[in-house]
Every structure is written in C-alpha cells, then in structure tokens.
Image: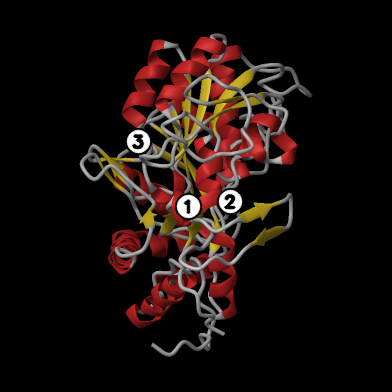
C-alpha cells in the first residue's frame, strides 16, 4: 500500500452532525428563547431520561459543572451544608479513579477535599475493586467515591457498588465518556448515587459543550436546578440563602443536543465497527485493543485504543513535557506511532496520564491492590509482581483515530502505518 498524507486531517473524534440540530437551534432563535430556559432544554432532558432510564436529567453548561454539583450534592448529604466561603469537603478525603481526565477529580479540590487515587485494573482499564477494598482498609473514614468509565468502557460497577455499600460510601459516577454504554443491560450513569454525562465537542453526542446531572430524586434535581441558577429563592426579589453557580445549560446548546440524541445508537454502531476493524487489522501484531467484559458490558467504543505488549516495546523515556524514544527493529512505542500518524495528517493521543503522576496531585495518596501508596519507577509486570497498573497502561498505550466519519480505506491506512512502525525500514 502506498502511503500518502491525508488531504484533510483525520481527527481523533470530531463532531458528527446530521441537520436536525439546525432546526432546533433555529427554533430557539425564532422563539427568542436563547438563555437557560426553553423547549430545547426540556426536550433534551426528557430524551436523555428516556434513553438512560433515570427519572431526572438536569442540563448544565458542561460535564465538569455537572461533576462539581454532583460532588457538592453528595458532600451535603454526608456532611451537611457548608458555611459560605467553605468547601463542602474541607479536610476530607475522596476516593477517585486514577487513570482519567483531570476534570473527573478537580471538583473535589474545588470543594476543599483531598483526592485519594485508586489504581486501575487491566480487565477494563478502570478502577480496580481490589485496590478499592484495600483503600477502605487504609482510610475507613472515606465516605465518597468518584468513578469514571474510561473511553466509553464500563468499569466493574457491580463489585464497586457492593464495596461502597458495605462501607457506607456514596458514588458519584462520571459517565462523561460512556453515554450509551451498558453494564448488565443497564445504562452507565445510573449505577451511582448521582451520575454525570458530557456533550463536549469530541464526545459521542455533542452540543459543542454542555453536560447533564442524572438522578432519580426529584428533590435532588430541584436542588441542582436551583444551585445552577445562582440559588435564587422563591421570592419577588433576588433572594439568596446559599451559594449558587452560573451552570445552567443554554437553550441553543440544548437545541444541538436535542438534534443529536436520536443518532446515539447510530454513532455507537459506527464506533463499534471502527474498534472491530482495528482489532482484526492488528491480530498479527504484538498489541491488544482496550479491553471490556464481553459478557456483562457493551461499551459505546468512544475511542479505540491499543496496548503494546511489554516485550515489543522499544525504549521510550518521558519527562514532564518531553519524550524520547529509540527505534528498534520489530518493536515500537506509543511516541513513535503517534509521531508517525501525525506525519500523515492524522490525530492520535496518549492514554490519559494517571492523576497520581500529575505534578498538581503528586503528593496525594495513591493505592494499588497490594496497598502500596506511590508510583514505582518501573511499571512493567515482572513474574506476576503487583505493580502500578495505570502507569503501565500509560507507558504502553495510545488512542487511535476513532472519528466515526473515517472511511474503511482511511482506517486501513492507519492500520498499515501502525504495522510499519514495527518493521525496520522507514516509511517517509
């Protein structure tokens, strides 16, 4: 196969629109409902409730805003309403997924809490229930957990739910990446005490921005609507008795989301086909695709990722912002593959760098399944020894172009590029 750079850039995951979005956006303009109330918000919330199977969905300005209010809501249930000027988690620890985007855990800091990071497991690349059990032994006072479903793959939510119930802990479920994914036939976002989804520009359904908080409690939904509109009381003037936020979704953003939701299953099918095509194309390479429980779960396949076998890794050294690698015949590394893909005008991405490795959180506690608290310099598994699994996946993994508008021919070229990274001769 002759390899030439793509004429138009092949993106990791860009918005896919269908036309209905414009109809609802235009409706917002025509009716002059442009702010944080309107038919689009009401209908988008209704459609998400019907799809996910929850009683209430509250439209908010972003997934991060939804996470912030979800964490504040759970903290108030546990510890009561904080004083103005104080976070709801002041001086308290919260268990958090380690390998995720930092938006999952930053709201803990917004509320004055301290994240304790729980290591990842290989089966789904999500929070390890064994490490979580160990964390509760080490920190029995913790009563809140924030869990994310990485790249659209559900974590072991049944095991994690049982562990949290035994320890009296509430779960904030970050389903920002996993809208439409199921575990035991149930949608992600409803396994926690409160759930969150995102409509950011690269998500499987997008409003360009926006998010929703999911709950079966009418009381909680009303509270979130109030908090997200500056906590205005029911009075003839602007009366405020608790801290509020400007977090409500706009009717224009909701119009785009309203037009996207009917295409969710279509987008998932396209993403699944991309994942399966990569898996088939790489079957003779020393790599594996991001895994999932093929009996209990059905991911939304938001991003297709690969993990290079440890004995097929060429030498790669990463600093805080720079990286070097050594070309080795028959081997490769994420940096080489990503650099090569970029030369052909396509976009890949490293796996999320675990939170315990981030400079901002490096002094926070980190718990592995053997109870160790910090990262090791060598993450690879040696003779079955327990190690830092999140670091290992970060070292050996990468996200491949996963745009659902990518054609089979374009994907075949990406597959060929990856294959040639494992051979001796150069490609350019």
Q: Are marks 2 and 1 in contact (CB under 8 Å)?
A: yes
232 shown above or below 345: above
**Residue under the point 37% across and 55% down:** 289
Q: CA distance from mark 2 to mark 1?
A: 8 Å
Residue 6 visible within the image: yes
| Residue 17 picture quarter | bottom left
Q: Earlier in the sequence, mark 3 or mark 2?
A: 2
Q: Residue 42: x percent and y percent? A: 43, 50
Tell me the residue that label 3 is attached to: 55
- In the picture, the disc for residue 41 is 1
Of tags 3 and 2, which is closer to the observer? 3
Q: Residue 320: x percent and y percent? A: 74, 49
As helix, strand or loop, the secondary structure at mark 2 comes to: loop
Left/right of residue 249 with respect to residue 360 in the rendered view: left
Q: CA distance from mark 3 to mark 2?
A: 21 Å
Of tags 3 and 1, which is closer to the observer? 3
Near-viewer residue (395 or 347): 395
Near-viewer residue (356 or 427): 427
- In the picture, the disc for residue 36 is 2
On-image quarter of the C terminus:
bottom right
As helix, strand or loop, the secondary structure at mark 1 comes to: helix
Left/right of residue 15 with respect to residue 183 in the rendered view: right
157 shown above or below 316: above
């Amino acid at each position: 196969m002759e390899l030439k750079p793509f004429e138009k850039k092949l993106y990791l995951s860009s918005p896919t629109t269908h036309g209905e979005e414009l109809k609802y956006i235009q409706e917002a303009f025509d009716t002059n409902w442009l702010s944080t109330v309107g038919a689009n918000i009401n209908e988008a919330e209704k459609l998400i409730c019907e799809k996910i199977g929850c009683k209430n969905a509250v439209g908010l300005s972003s997934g991060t805003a939804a996470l912030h209010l979800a964490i504040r809501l759970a903290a108030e249930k546990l510890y009561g309403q904080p004083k103005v000027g104080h976070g709801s988690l002041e001086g308290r620890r919260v268990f958090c997924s380690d390998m995720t985007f930092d938006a999952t855990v930053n709201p803990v800091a917004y509320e004055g809490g301290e994240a304790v990071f729980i290591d990842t497991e290989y089966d789904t690349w999500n929070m390890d229930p064994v490490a979580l059990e160990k964390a509760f032994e080490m920190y029995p006072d913790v009563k809140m957990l924030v869990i994310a479903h990485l790249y659209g793959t559900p974590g072991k939510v049944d095991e994690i739910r049982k562990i949290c119930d035994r320890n009296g802990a509430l779960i904030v479920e970050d389903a920002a990446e996993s809208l439409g994914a199921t575990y035991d036939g149930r949608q992600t976002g409803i396994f926690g005490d409160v759930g969150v989804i995102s409509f950011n520009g690269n998500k499987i359904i997008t409003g360009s921005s926006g998010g929703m908080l999911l709950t079966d409690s009418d009381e909680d939904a009303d509270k979130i609507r109030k908090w997200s509109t500056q906590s205005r009381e029911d009075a003839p003037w602007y009366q405020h008795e608790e801290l509020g936020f400007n977090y409500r979704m706009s009717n224009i953003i909701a119009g785009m989301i309203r037009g996207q939701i009917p295409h969710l299953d279509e987008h998932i099918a396209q993403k699944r086909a991309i994942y399966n095509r990569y898996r088939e194309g790489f079957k003779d390479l020393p790599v594996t695709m991001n895994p999932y429980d093929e009996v209990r779960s059905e991911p939304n396949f938001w991003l297709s990722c690969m993990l290079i076998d440890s004995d097929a890794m060429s030498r790669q050294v990463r600093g805080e912002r720079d990286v070097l690698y050594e070309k080795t015949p028959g081997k490769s590394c994420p940096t080489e593959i990503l650099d090569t893909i970029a030369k052909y005008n396509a976009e890949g991405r490293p796996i999320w760098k675990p939170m315990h490795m981030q400079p901002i959180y490096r002094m926070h506690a980190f718990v592995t399944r053997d109870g160790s608290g910090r990262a090791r310099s060598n993450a690879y598994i040696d003779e079955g020894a327990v190690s830092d699994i999140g670091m290992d996946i970060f070292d050996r993994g990468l996200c491949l172009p996963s745009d659902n508008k990518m054609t089979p021919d374009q994907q075949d070229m990406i597959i060929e590029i990856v294959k040639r990274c494992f051979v001796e001769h150069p490609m350019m």
